[in-house]
C-alpha cells in the first residue's frame, strides 16, 4: 500500500482522533507492515520457460515511490528453462529517471556440483522486468538455462532489488 500524502493543516483547526489516526497511526502502521505477495511472470528473449512443478514467488514493500522487491525461483523436476535471456516481472513499472541495480544469487544443488553464484539484477528505466546477470566485469551474462549453471531440480535463484516506481 502506498503512503498517502499528508494533508495541509489550517491554523485553528480542531484535530480529531479520526484525523490523527488517518494522518499518523495508519501511515506508521503501513511503514512497519510486512511485504505483500505478488505473482511473478518468468519470460525470456527466446522460447518461453515454464515453472511447471517448480515454484516462483515474489514479495514487495512499497514506501512512497520506492519499491523493495524479492523474487525466489526454485526449479522442479519438470521445469522447462526455455531459451534466451531470462527476465522476471516486477510488481510495478520502474521510473523513467534512471536504471536500477540489485542483487541476484543462484544456488546450484546438483549432486557433486553444489555451489552458488552471486550476480546482479538489472532494471532498465521504465521497465517492468528485472534481468539477472552473472559473471565478472569482463564477461557478465544474462541468466539462461545454462548460466550461471545448467539448471536442475532443486536449484534456486533469488533476486532482490530496490527501485523507484513510475
Image (cartoon, rainbow, N blue to C red):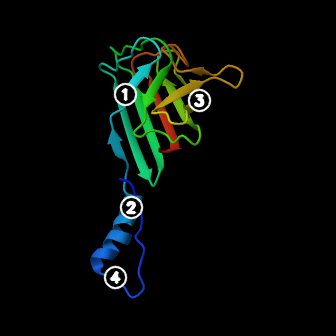
What is the secondary structure assignment of the residue under circle 4? Answer: loop
Q: Which of 59 and 116 lies nearest the eye of the viewer? A: 59
Residue beneath label 3, please? 119
What residue occupies the far left of the structure in this picture? 18
C-alpha distance separating marks 2 and 4? 18 Å
C-alpha distance separating marks 1 and 4? 46 Å
C-alpha distance separating marks 3 and 4? 51 Å
Report the mark closest to the observer, 3 or 4. Answer: 4
Report the mark closest to the observer, 1 or 2. Answer: 2
Considering only vertical position in the picture, is 105 above or below 22? above
C-alpha distance separating marks 1 and 2? 29 Å
Residue beneath label 2, please? 4
Residue beneath label 1, please? 41
Task: Tell me which label, 3 or 2, sits earlier in the chain.
Answer: 2
What is the secondary structure assignment of the residue under circle 2? Answer: loop
Q: Residues within 10 Å of mark 3 (few under 14, many from 20)?
A: many
> x and y percent of residue 4 in the render?
38, 61
What is the secondary structure assignment of the residue under circle 1? Answer: loop
Q: Which of 75 and 137 lies nearest the eye of the viewer? A: 137
> x and y percent of residue 30 in the render?
37, 59
Report the mark closest to the observer, 1 or 3. Answer: 1
> x and y percent of residue 161 in the render?
51, 40
Label 1 with label 2: CB-CB less than 8 Å = no
Amino acid at each position: 500500500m502506498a503512503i498517502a500524502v499528508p494533508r495541509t493543516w489550517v491554523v485553528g483547526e480542531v484535530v480529531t482522533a479520526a484525523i490523527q489516526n488517518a494522518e499518523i497511526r495508519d501511515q506508521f502502521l503501513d511503514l512497519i507492515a510486512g511485504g505483500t505477495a505478488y505473482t511473478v511472470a518468468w519470460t525470456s528473449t527466446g522460447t518461453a520457460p515454464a515453472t511447471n512443478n517448480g515454484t516462483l514467488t515474489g514479495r514487495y514493500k512499497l514506501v512512497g515511490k520506492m519499491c523493495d522487491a524479492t523474487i525466489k525461483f526454485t526449479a522442479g523436476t519438470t521445469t522447462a528453462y526455455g531459451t534466451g535471456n531470462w527476465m522476471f516481472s516486477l510488481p510495478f513499472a520502474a521510473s523513467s529517471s534512471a536504471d536500477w541495480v540489485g542483487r541476484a544469487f543462484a544456488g546450484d544443488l546438483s549432486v557433486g556440483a553444489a555451489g552458488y553464484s552471486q550476480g546482479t539484477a538489472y532494471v532498465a528505466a521504465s521497465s517492468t522486468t528485472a534481468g539477472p546477470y552473472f559473471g565478472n566485469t569482463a564477461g557478465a551474462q544474462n541468466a539462461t538455462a545454462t548460466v550461471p549453471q545448467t539448471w536442475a531440480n532443486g536449484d534456486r535463484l533469488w533476486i532482490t532489488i530496490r527501485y523507484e516506481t513510475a
